[in-house]
Structures are given as structure tokens and as C-alpha cells.
Image (spheres, rainbow, N blue to C red):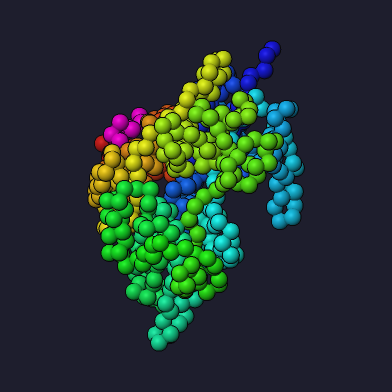
């Protein structure tokens, strides 16, 4: 009997996980191919939400997704491991040994592949700035976001022991005025006010200085000048300091030195300027890379030297027909590439040629914290159209819903999930879909499992609680009627 083709995907970020999920549902379920997903982490969290983890606005443990459970539900296999190399002749992927506290948990291993997809994402690029690696936190991994959050809280805990006359001034410096830096600054502004309300009065909000340092003439230079100006206006209204056309030359324990000679004091320093792919990609059996370690790919996302190896997302340098610059390293680009690559690999499994990828810029949304329950969002859509307020807030939330929909399907992912209401202690019954009314009797559990099959998401758990609440109410009414 002929063995099924084996598709191995290395990297379970937003793009890699969406691709593996689609292939598992389309090929794995129908036994047309074996799908294997590899990642060094056990759980997934959407990278654009790391700034919320860093400020404590999001509990990563509640919002994470288990790769093992997700793989089981979507007809694929998950392997825990870190990419160590590949052998293009033997078509094998080498994984490094897994060690925990000096003990080897998993030995070095290798997996055979017929088609290999590399989607390992990117990491912060400090441009070899002196002291940056030692004194800055790079907000590119969940562990780093949690480390920032702990350091942030520790400063407040220490300040809580100070006397009134020794009140502390807290300086936070963010290098990079892109989306990550801007969203982190706005969310931090909200957090410092919340901590004061919660009783941490050692640091007053007016004594917290948040500074964004950007080398370009304006923040978010990738957006239109109109959108950038609107964002700058909002940041200034939050009393966030903006230093544009400033370049960091050295980072010390006390702060940052600028090329202009200026010194910015900071107890907490974040580097979010620039990205690069992991250095390991330059050692993958001769595959071509660029100056920031990205794998060079054709417009079909096939690597330039091997038709059996694909790459996409931040770790790939993909050309844009008719444009001087390549596809930008953005979440929407990875999502679009995952959709096209899924179709290409399905075509490849049928013996047909892969599909060319054409990037479509659908605009940008940047969260600038909260104003009540609405928040302030700026978008750069269709040329120079900028909008803000409630509509933009809804669009921003829908970005995450689109990611959830790609992973869990339309029926499981609701446009307006009751999760936020449940966390506020509100009655979530009004937020649940009216169609989710399981019948009475012993089949209730089975119906719940069929309707809400995604056990690894908080959305599943919240919807299940809502439905159980309704069942209990109806059962109570039946008992009263019978009595």
C-alpha cells in the first residue's frame, strides 16, 4: 500500500497554525496526507496581543490554545521540538534535544517529510546596539511579555513600601514607534491608572513617564501621514512622550543614550524596533537568505532552491509583483499567505502546480487603549481613509475573531463572544446565540460536545457555561410546573 504524503509545518504561530488547521481539515481528515505541526511551545497565543499580556490586560493562561488538543480535533499530529537543521537530500527535519533543568526530556530527533513548510516567525532586531540585549526586553515572545509584566509589577510592589515624601518617579522607555510600541504605550497608560485604583499608590499616574523613541520622522511611518498624525494626537492626549528622529546608540541599566547626545532615564526598557528571522535559517542546508535572515521565496512561496520546501510569514522574503518592496512582515500578510499556501498544497497533493501569492493590503488598525468600553482605534484603509471610535473598535476586535474563525470555524467563533461580559460579572445569557438551545434529557452532554467542539478555547468554556445556565433555568421551571 502506498504511504500518504507527509507535510511537515515548522512553526505554529498565527500563520503556521492556520495553515496546519486547514490542511488537517481538508487533507488529514480525508486521509489524503499526513500533517505534522512542530513548535517549541506547548500552547499558542496570538502575537499581536502580546502587549496586552505585558501590561496585564490579558491573562495568557486563559487565552492560550493547546497545540495537542487542537491537533487532535483537526486531524493532524503535533510534535514538541525546536528546529535544529534540515537535510534536503534525505528530506529530513532535525529537532534539538529538549532539556528542562538540566534533565533531557526528549532526545534529538529527526522527521521525514515530502513537503516542508517553514513558518518560524521573527524576533526583535536590535541592530547590534550596545547594551540592548542585556538591558532591554524584546517583546517578541510570550515569555518576554510575562517577564515585562512581572518587572512592571515588582516596581509597583517596591514603591508601595515608600513613604509619602519618597514617592517614586517611574520611567518607561519603548524603542520603536511601530504598532507594538504604540499599543504597548497606550495600554501601559491605562494600567498605571488601574493599579492606583487597586491600591498601589506608591507611584502616582502623573509620576509615570512613558516615552516612545522612533528613528523615523513620525510614529507608525508605514501608515499614511494623516493616520500617523491622528495617532500622535491621541498619544499626546495620554501624556505619552514622543521622540521622533532619534536613534539609540547605547543602552545602560539607567537608561538610553541617543545619537544626538540626549539621555533618556528608564527603569524599564522595551525594544520593539525592527525584526529579523532566526539566525538558524542561514544554515538550512544552503537555502538562500537575505540580510535579516529571511528565506528567499518565489511568488508561489516556494524557496528559490528547493521546490519541496515552502516558507511564509515573517521568516520569508516574498516579492510583490509591480512593487519595489517585498511583502511586509505583518499579521494580515501571514494570514493571506496561509490561505493561499493551503490551496497550493492541496493542488500539489493532486499533482498540480502551486498558486502564486498576491498580497492585498487591507489597511491597519492600532489600538490606543480604552476610553470607557470603546477605546480609540485608528485605521488606514483604502488610500488615505482614517477612522476612529466605536466602528474602529469593532473592526479591531474582528481581527482576532477572524484568527479564531480560521482555527475553530464559523459556528464556534461568534462575532460577539460573551467572554468579556462574563469577566465583568455581567449576565452572559443575553450574549449567547438564541440557536444554542440543547434539548432536555440525557443527550444534553452529547449535544454540547457536538455544538461546541473546541475544548481548548475560553470561548468554548464560556458558551458552555451559558448553555448550562439556560438548561438549569428551564429544568427548574419544569420542576416547578410538575410540583
| Coordinates of residue 172 in the picture (x, y in percent) | 44, 68
| Coordinates of residue 454 in the picture (x, y in percent) | 46, 35
Tell me the quarter of the picture where residue 211 sits: bottom left
Q: Which sits in the foreground, 134 or 76? A: 134
Q: Residue at x 70, y 46 (%)?
A: 98
Q: Residue at x 52, y 22 (%)?
A: 354
> In the displayed structure, would residue 420 be above or below residue 31?
below
Does residue 440 appear anywhere in the picture? no
| Coordinates of residue 396 in the picture (x, y in percent) | 33, 45
Assign the magenta stretch its main secondary structure: loop
Q: Which sits in the foreground, 315 or 203? A: 315
Tell me the quarter of the picture where residue 460 sits: top left
Classify the position of the C terminus by image quarter.
top left
Does residue 40 appear anywhere in the picture? yes
Q: Residue at x 69, y 39 (%)?
A: 85
Q: Which sits in the foreground, 65 or 482? A: 65
Farthest top residue? Answer: 1
Farthest bottom residue? Answer: 165
Classify the position of the N terminus by image quarter.
top right
| Image mark count | 0
Q: Residue at x 26, y 47 (%)?
A: 386
Q: Which sits in the foreground, 58 or 96? A: 96
**Which range is magenta?**
431-439
Left or right of 401 in this view: 234? left
| Coordinates of residue 102 in the picture (x, y in percent) | 74, 55
| Residue 478 falls within the magenta-colored stretch | no
> In the displayed structure, would residue 89 be above or below residue 366?
above
Amino acid at each position: 500500500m502506498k504511504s500518504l504524503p507527509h507535510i511537515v509545518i515548522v512553526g505554529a504561530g498565527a500563520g503556521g497554525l492556520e495553515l496546519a488547521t486547514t490542511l488537517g481539515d481538508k487533507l488529514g481528515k480525508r486521509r489524503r496526507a499526513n500533517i505534522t505541526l512542530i513548535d517549541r511551545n506547548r500552547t499558542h497565543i496570538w502575537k499581536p496581543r502580546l502587549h496586552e499580556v505585558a501590561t496585564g490586560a490579558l491573562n495568557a493562561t486563559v487565552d492560550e490554545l493547546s497545540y495537542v488538543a487542537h491537533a487532535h480535533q483537526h486531524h493532524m499530529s503535533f510534535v514538541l521540538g525546536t528546529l535544529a537543521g534540515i537535510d534536503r537530500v534525505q528530506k529530513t527535519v532535525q529537532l534539538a534535544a529538549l532539556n528542562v533543568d538540566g534533565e533531557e526530556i526528549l532526545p534529538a530527533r529527526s522527521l521525514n517529510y515530502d513537503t516542508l513548510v517553514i513558518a518560524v516567525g521573527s524576533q526583535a532586531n536590535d541592530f547590534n546596539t550596545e547594551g540592548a540585549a542585556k538591558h532591554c526586553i524584546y517583546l517578541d515572545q510570550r515569555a518576554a511579555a510575562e517577564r515585562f509584566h512581572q518587572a512592571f509589577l515588582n516596581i509597583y510592589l517596591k514603591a508601595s513600601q515608600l513613604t509619602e515624601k519618597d514617592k517614586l518617579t517611574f520611567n518607561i522607555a519603548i524603542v520603536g514607534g511601530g504598532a507594538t510600541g504604540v499599543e504597548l504605550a497606550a495600554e501601559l497608560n491605562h494600567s498605571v491608572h488601574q493599579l492606583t485604583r487597586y491600591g498601589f499608590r506608591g507611584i502616582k499616574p502623573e509620576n509615570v513617564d512613558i516615552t516612545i523613541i522612533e528613528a523615523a520622522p513620525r510614529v507608525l511611518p508605514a501608515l499614511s501621514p494623516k493616520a500617523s498624525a491622528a495617532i500622535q494626537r491621541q498619544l499626546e492626549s495620554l501624556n505619552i512622550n514622543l521622540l521622533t528622529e532619534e536613534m539609540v546608540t547605547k543602552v545602560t541599566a539607567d537608561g538610553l543614550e541617543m545619537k544626538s547626545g540626549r539621555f533618556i532615564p528608564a527603569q524599564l526598557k522595551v525594544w520593539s524596533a525592527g525584526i529579523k528571522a532566526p539566525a538558524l535559517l542561514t544554515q538550512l542546508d544552503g537555502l538562500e537568505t537575505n540580510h535579516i535572515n529571511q528565506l528567499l521565496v518565489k511568488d508561489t512561496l516556494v524557496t528559490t532552491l528547493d521546490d519541496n520546501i515552502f516558507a511564509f510569514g515573517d521568516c520569508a522574503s516574498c516579492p510583490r509583483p509591480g512593487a519595489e518592496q517585498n511583502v511586509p512582515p505583518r499579521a494580515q500578510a501571514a494570514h493571506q499567505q496561509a490561505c493561499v499556501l493551503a490551496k497550493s498544497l492541496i493542488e500539489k497533493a493532486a499533482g498540480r502546480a502551486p498558486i502564486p501569492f498576491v498580497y492585498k493590503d487591507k489597511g491597519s488598525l492600532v489600538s490606543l487603549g480604552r476610553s470607557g468600553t470603546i477605546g480609540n482605534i485608528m485605521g488606514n484603509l483604502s488610500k488615505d481613509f482614517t477612522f476612529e471610535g466605536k466602528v474602529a473598535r469593532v473592526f479591531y476586535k474582528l481581527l482576532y475573531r477572524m484568527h479564531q474563525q480560521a482555527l475553530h470555524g464559523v459556528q464556534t467563533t461568534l462575532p460577539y463572544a460573551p467572554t468579556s461580559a462574563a469577566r465583568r460579572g455581567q449576565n452572559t445569557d443575553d450574549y449567547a446565540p438564541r440557536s444554542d438551545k440543547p434539548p432536555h434529557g440525557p443527550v444534553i452532554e452529547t449535544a454540547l460536545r457536538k455544538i461546541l467542539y473546541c475544548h481548548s478555547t475560553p470561548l468554548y468554556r464560556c458558551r458552555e457555561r451559558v448553555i448550562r445556565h439556560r438548561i438549569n433555568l428551564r429544568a427548574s421551571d419544569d420542576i416547578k410546573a410538575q410540583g
